[in-house]
Amino acid sequence: MYCALTDLQAIVPNNDLVQLTDDAIPPAAIVQANVDRAIADAGELIDGYLRGRYSLPLNPVPGLIKTLAGDIAVYRLYARRVKLTPPEGVSERYRNSLKLLEQIQMGKVALGAEAVTGAVTPEAGGPQVSAPDRVFTRSGLRDY
């Protein structure tokens, strides 16, 4: 998990978290299982973008990933409520998180050199191709 309940409480007021996580009527408390599910979903999404570029799970968790995980998890909590449209700020932060994850995936934004697991970096010069020796050559086929 890349964030925790305390990180979500820094983003969303406690009363809103109660409303988003407790299915009882009236909602009474934050349901940790629903918070954990949203955080796990956020982590899976982040790992999906970072797989192949970084060694997963990220340890220690970079601050940027913790922020992105919090924003995505809050959006996922709003998504639990079918009839509740997330506030524009929450939706915008979610969209921005996905854009930033795409940039990290493409290598335009780096999380830190310690997390890289041998990502391919282009070398100077033109493209290089390697292949086995040719079976049929001009000189070998000249007599046919």
Image (spheres, rainbow, N blue to C red):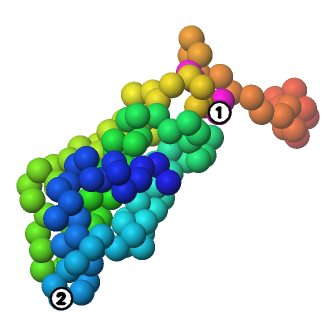
Mark closer to the observer (2, 1): 2
Which residue appears at 20% of the width and 54% of the height?
12
Q: Determine which of the numbered discs, if any, sits on residue 25 in the image.
A: 2
- The foreground one among 78 and 48 is 78
Residue assigned mark 1? 117
The reply to whether the magenta stretch includes residue 8 is: no
Q: Please determine whether, in this image, residue 73 is positioned above or below residue 106.
A: below
Under mark 1, the amino acid is Thr
Which residue appears at 81% of the width and 29% of the height?
138
Q: Position of residue 82 (x, y in %)?
A: 19, 79
> Distance from label 2 to label 1 (Cα)?
48 Å
Q: Please determine whether, in this image, residue 27 is positioned above or below residue 67.
A: below
What residue range appears in magenta? 117-122
Q: Residues within 10 Å of mark 2 (few under 14, many from 20)?
A: few
**Which residue is outermost to the front?**
28
The reply to whether the magenta stretch includes residue 120 is: yes
- The foreground one among 17 and 140 is 17
Q: Please determine whether, in this image, residue 144 is positioned above or below residue 21.
A: above
Q: Position of residue 94 (x, y in %)?
A: 24, 52
Q: Splitting the image into 4 quarters, where does residue 128 fall?
A: top right
